[in-house]
Image (cartoon, helix red, strand yellow):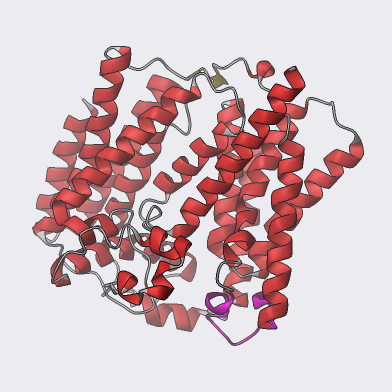
């Protein structure tokens, strides 16, 4: 049913776009995205169900892009339209087929009525405090080393729009940005503690979370700050089944304020941003222009790739994490010698499926979307019988990656795999500590 509705709306949007009716085209897809998400929520009671999240943000983001508010945006190739459709269809069909095969017509709901189905009182939080303190300490030490080695802190530098881009010491920066995992681990620690820890441990864990949120600010990384907060919020929702509206409003206001401060700290003034975004309406407020372009132009970059790619990379782009994490890219630079194709040099963000197309074209998009659908189904299924609390962080990471599917390739980014490796190490550590405690 959902895919049929999406197909009808997608075809209508395509025809409206071809006729030059950009606003109706975009609104049609945005309405479909909201309907798909609400349908998933009504069926499962899960605010962060992976299929619902992907439906809302991937389809909704495409709808935003269809509004064509910037002169950088051009009519998309039919191949681009087909790829965007198949990216969603492959994900949903794989998810649905696996659900029907194992659970009948519909998978059992992991959440009902805003309450998590798992009896959470039986989950052990053993090892979480040490994990919070350990990851935070390593991240802080790495940040201090980078600041000492490079001789500056990006937040304190003025007049250098790309100061953060240069704040990288090879190999060390992975440990610096692992701070984004600490707030989510902190949430899990406080939720599982249930009053067992003393004030000093709670205070130390809270301090570790604050320090971990301060590191992205000092690095002037809006992206890392958003990622850290989003992971923590997702974990809380998965555990509680809801997120208080008052908390959401306060958190939203704080994030907007932090975003503005970091934008100023990056020396990105309004004139600079308007000159890059090339909006058709030059008087449009920057607080609308900036988020719009950070969503819409990624789809434009995919279309630019489709129209200008001369030959496929046959897996070399997607395997970049292997070349980076093993250091092979320094030994054989040709392994990573595949330039990014974008419509403007300053706007380098792309969609989740950019490298899949770069490697194998339409086939790559379909295969990758099916893999995402299968992994998402597995995580949703595991959510119903989670025993290790760190498992929620795995789920939260996939949720955030799908939520920001319009923003970057994620899985061909070595940092993503470093996050997953750190999470896996914490998972094993907490599992060992839990078993020792039971023994």
Q: Is residue 193 left or right of residue 28?
A: right
Between residue 427 and residue 2, name the one nearer to us: 427
Judged from this view, the residue extending furthest toward the top is 104
Q: Is residue 152 magenta?
A: yes
Measuring 15% from the left and 49% from the top, which residue is drawn there?
363
Q: Residue at x 62, y 45 (%)?
A: 249
Which residue is farthest front? 331
Q: Give the main secondary structure of the magenta stretch.
A: loop
Residue 210 among magenta residues: no
Residue 390 appears anywhere in the view: yes
Quadrant in which the C terminus appears: top right
Specify the quadrant of the image occupied by residue 179: bottom right
Of residue 94 and residue 346, the one placed in the foreground of this image is 94
Q: In which quadrant will I find the N terminus?
A: top left
Residue 436 drawn at (x, y percent):
74, 24
Residue 161 position (above or below residue 102)? below
User: Relative to 156, does residue 401 appear above or below in the rendering?
Assistant: above
Which residue occupies 29% across, 71% down?
70
Name, please, the residue furthest toward the bottom.
159
**Taking 415 as reference, is 331 above or below it?**
below
* Residue range (magenta): 151-167
User: Where in the figure is residue 153, as x and y percent of width and height?
Assistant: 69, 77
């Amino acid at each position: 049913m959902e895919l049929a509705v999406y197909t009808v709306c997608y075809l209508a949007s395509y025809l409206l776009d071809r006729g030059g009716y950009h606003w109706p085209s975009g609104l049609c897809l945005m309405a479909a995205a909201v309907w798909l998400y609400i349908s998933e929520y009504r069926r499962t009671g899960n605010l962060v169900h992976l299929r619902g999240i992907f439906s809302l943000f991937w389809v909704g983001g495409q709808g935003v892009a269809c509004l064509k508010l910037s002169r950088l945006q051009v009519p998309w190739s039919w191949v681009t339209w087909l790829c965007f459709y198949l990216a969603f269809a492959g994900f949903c069909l794989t998810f649905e087929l696996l659900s029907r095969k194992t659970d009948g017509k519909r998978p059992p709901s992991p959440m009902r009525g805003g309450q998590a189905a798992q009896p959470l009182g039986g989950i052990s939080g053993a090892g979480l405090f040490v994990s919070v303190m350990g990851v935070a300490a390593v991240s802080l030490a790495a940040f201090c080393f980078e600041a000492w080695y490079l001789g500056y802190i990006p937040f304190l530098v003025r007049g250098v729009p790309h100061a953060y881009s240069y704040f990288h010491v090879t190999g060390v920066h992975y440990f610096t940005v692992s701070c984004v995992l600490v707030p989510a681990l902190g949430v899990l620690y406080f939720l599982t503690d249930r009053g067992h820890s003393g004030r000093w441990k709670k205070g130390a864990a809270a301090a570790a979370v604050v320090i971990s949120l301060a590191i992205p600010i000092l690095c002037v990384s809006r992206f890392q700050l958003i990622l850290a907060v989003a992971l923590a919020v997702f974990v809380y929702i998965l555990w509680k089944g809801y997120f208080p509206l008052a908390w959401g409003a306060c958190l939203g206001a704080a994030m907007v304020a932090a975003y503005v401060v970091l934008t100023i700290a990056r020396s990105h003034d309004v004139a600079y941003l308007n000159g890059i975004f090339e909006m058709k309406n030059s008087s449009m407020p920057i607080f609308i222009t900036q988020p719009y372009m950070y969503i819409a132009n990624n789809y434009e970059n995919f279309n630019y790739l489709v129209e200008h790619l001369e030959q496929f990379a046959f897996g070399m782009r997607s395997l970049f994490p292997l070349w980076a994490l093993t250091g092979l890219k320094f030994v054989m630079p040709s392994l990573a010698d595949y330039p990014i194709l974008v419509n403007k040099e300053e706007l380098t963000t792309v969609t989740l499926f950019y490298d899949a197309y770069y490697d194998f074209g339409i086939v790559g998009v379909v295969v990758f979307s099916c893999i995402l659908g299968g992994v998402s189904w597995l995580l949703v299924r595991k959510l119903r019988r989670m025993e290790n609390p760190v498992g929620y962080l795995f789920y939260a990471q996939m949720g955030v990656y799908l939520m920001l599917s319009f923003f970057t390739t994620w899985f061909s980014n070595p940092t993503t795999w470093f996050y997953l490796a750190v999470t896996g190490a914490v998972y094993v550590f907490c599992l060992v500590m839990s078993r020792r405690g039971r023994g």
